Image: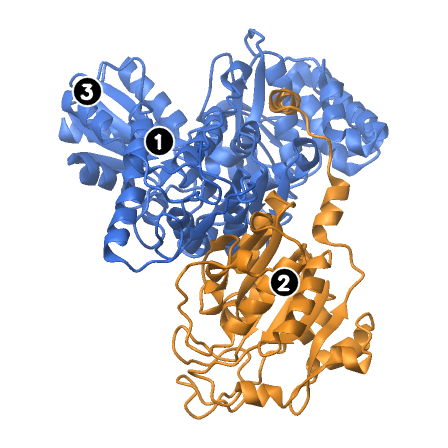
Chain colours: A blue, B orange
Amino acid sequence: MSRDRQGRGLQVISRTLGRLLVRAGYHVFVSQDVMSRIRGGHNFARVRISTGPVAADGEKAEILVALDPALVVRHVADLAPDAVVLTDAAGGMPEGLNAVRLPLVDLAREHGRDAVMANAVAVGAALALVGLELTGLEDLFESQFAAKGGDVVRRNMAAAEAGHRAVVEDMKRCCPRKLAGAEPGDRLLISGAEAIALGAIAANVRVVTGYPMSPATPIVEYCFRHAREAGLIVEQTEDEISAANLAIGAAFAGARAMTCTAGGGFCLMNEALSLAGMTETPLVLCVGMRPGPGTGLATRTAQADLLFVIYAGHGEFPRAVLTPADAAQGFQAAQDAFRIAEKCQTPVIILFDQFMADALWTVERSELRVENRQERQVPEGVQPYGYRRYEVGEGGLSPMVLPGTPEQLVYADSDEHNEAGHITESAAMRVRMVDKRNAKTAGIRQEAEVKVEVEAKAKAEKETLVFCFGSSRGVVAEAVARLREKGRKVAMVHLHYIWPFPVEAVTALAAKGAKVVTVEQNYSGQLAQLLAQECGLRVAGTVRRYDGRQFSVAEVEAGLEQLTREVG
Amino acid sequence: MPDTASWSSTDEIAWCPACGNFGIREAVKTALSELGLKPEQTCFVSGIGQAAKAPHYIKCNLFNGLHGRTLPVAAGVKLANPELVVFAEGGDGDGYAEGGNHFLHALRRNLDMTYIVHDNQIYGLTKGQTSPTSEAGLKTKTTPCGAIEPAFRPLALAVMMDAGFVARGFCAKPRQLADVIKLAVQHRGFALVEVLQNCVSFNHVNTAKWYSHRVYDLAEEKHDPTDRDKAYHKALEWGDRIPTGVIYKSGRKSYDALRAEAEGNRVSVPRLIDRLLDQFA
């Protein structure tokens, strides 16, 4: 665990450490706990290191890195019994801890010529505590600070070396937390938000829009940073209404387009969502969940917008909702979203939680496959000026011609329209068009049916099925694994394609299982409601959390144990 | 005579007889045919209102979206396909009330498109409520004692924002309006064409006759549209004399031109992703 009061470089410390460890062959999981302010506040990151895959925070910290010793007291309860506390030599801290007090700031000034280099000192020191050398660190600093010049890289490196040396000299009176040997692999450390952005780029997105709002901002910022090389048009619009409508205009004109926001901004996009449904425009929306209502907890996590997103927008129209668990699923979800949006000509929502977006996940590079599939149905043999945008085809689909095509015109309308796209008030045509639009749901549902993920080990016979979605997957999988070790008959079912609800697959699973429970980060048990509504299942109980923080493995394990006992 | 027939639609027209929209439609068709464009080279984006139905009544690509959301959709179309000659079209309520924030930022962004606003100072489709451009004192269904607020002056705002091209036409002078629209299309940047229009059903003050007695052509006064101070005064002139024609032209480069200058070379997606993923190793 690493923390600091000024918010200075917390992300630099955790990401640099994480990447170095991943390069050394470890699996790393980094989660951020950040307050909603520009500087200061109580911010920290948890870094979990393992020789095998990890997708959740660990329980107790083995090492606490605190640039300011005054902050150690806040984390005493989070420490393992013999945890090492690495902190500055100056300042008071609680007694009785296994402390490594180093002059972090002085070393930073001396070797890095700047107090801010205390971050680098801490990185070097932390690596020494786990028994690693600084091999490769300079290369990492270079990739991180290349834009700031070679001098910054050299000063960071000098500071890190000073920190490393200081710990090694200090070892005489302190036990390092030496890591077990790891198998190097081709792995990456990447945030959920970055993975979604990269997935969109892999899907050949051309236009990305957004209005800054946590936790969606990092997706847009990543796109801005790489706009030139990726040939992206990235627009920060005047509001979310404009962001969504601009993306719709771009999609109508033939560009793969995506807009990014959080629950509150998505409220403003509801009208546009409905417009995309009516005009049958392929639109991808990234919607980040944070605790509401209202502004809620701006920088924290929740899963309380599931039902809202599924039912958002006036009128009836098809949509897909994907709920990726982690970076690998986020990368895939973005590609799937564009494929479905284009094929079904309807909005697709990537619904992620803040925890998923901001956490850094270790991903096998081979898991991130570029599919780059084009799904646009181009009509053939259309008479000059004879194209009909809303011609009723199989599964409610119409061939898609783009405006600008010689000798063809495209009419799209948010009013009810005829097959050509002109306004109509005909009752018969209204029914025909409602049927056409909603017929597309069946096609999207088929996609969802095959994506229901049942934990591989599960036999799903007379077991308790633990349903979850989004970033809960990592925590639930670990809790369920522990329960199975204890001989409990439980299995996890993670839904990352949640709407249209995979009714058949879930019903078939539940028919074999003894009972159904859910784990979700909301008050009202929204997934449990969906299971009841869509599949007629009686949900025996829900492990809930709604304080804006991610579940811990222990609390999910305890919650599930209690539920299986209660209903067992 | 320009060949406006090739720009004619067969869609049934839902406007009131003698509506000012008919004159605007004629001017648009004249301008398009005189510009030598083909229907498929154009894309009209509109919102909701009687004016917003206009694209259905000519022959063009069209996206008839939501009330007030015309400009963002038009921006998306232009950014995605810069080859299209993009028009946004709608009324005063659509553009200045519901779409007010988008209007403000479209002026600032200066994308290459032509925005035609049918301004009749009243809400027509919803049957006679006050609009942002209703004159103070105008009695409507929602201002039975007369409008309290002063009218919004969109052209003055546009000049203040250094919008690319700012002009005004009058629906009963379709020849002048067509010329203004042609200049607007030829301008590289955001072009606002505000069209004074009578509403035969709901605005019995600002009638065609009322406008006819007041409008004059700036071209006849040798107005220099590059003089921003003078343009600002002309944009605010209202009452006994109302100027029409080109009020202001900015030397500002369009957003799309500036964007194009910053464009990089695209590489193939798999290669690009490989390169980007390397940064996370």
Residue A318's x, y, as percent?
A: 33, 42
The answer to whether residue A103 shows anywhere in this view is no
Which residue is tagged 2?
B2
Quadrant for the C terminus of chain A in the image: top left
**Mark 2 or 1: the one toward you:** 2
* Residue A142 vs residue A412, the one in the foreground: A412
Sort mark 3 into few (<14), some (14-19) or many (20+) by Cα contacts within 10 Å.
Answer: many
Residue at 55% across, 72% down: B118
Sort mark 1 into few (<14), some (14-19) or many (20+) by Cα contacts within 10 Å.
Answer: many
When asked about the image quadrant of residue A150, the answer is top right
Which residue is tagged 1?
A497
Residue at 63% across, 15% down: A23
**Mark 3 or 1: the one toward you:** 1
Lateral position of residue B162 relative to residue A472, left or right = right
Which residue is tagged 3?
A463
Amino acid under disc 2: Pro
- Rounded to the nearest angstrom, the CA distance separating label 2 from label 3 is 78 Å
Residue at 42% across, 82% down: B201
Counting the numbered discs, the total is 3
Pick whichever of labels 3 and 1 is earlier in the sequence.
3
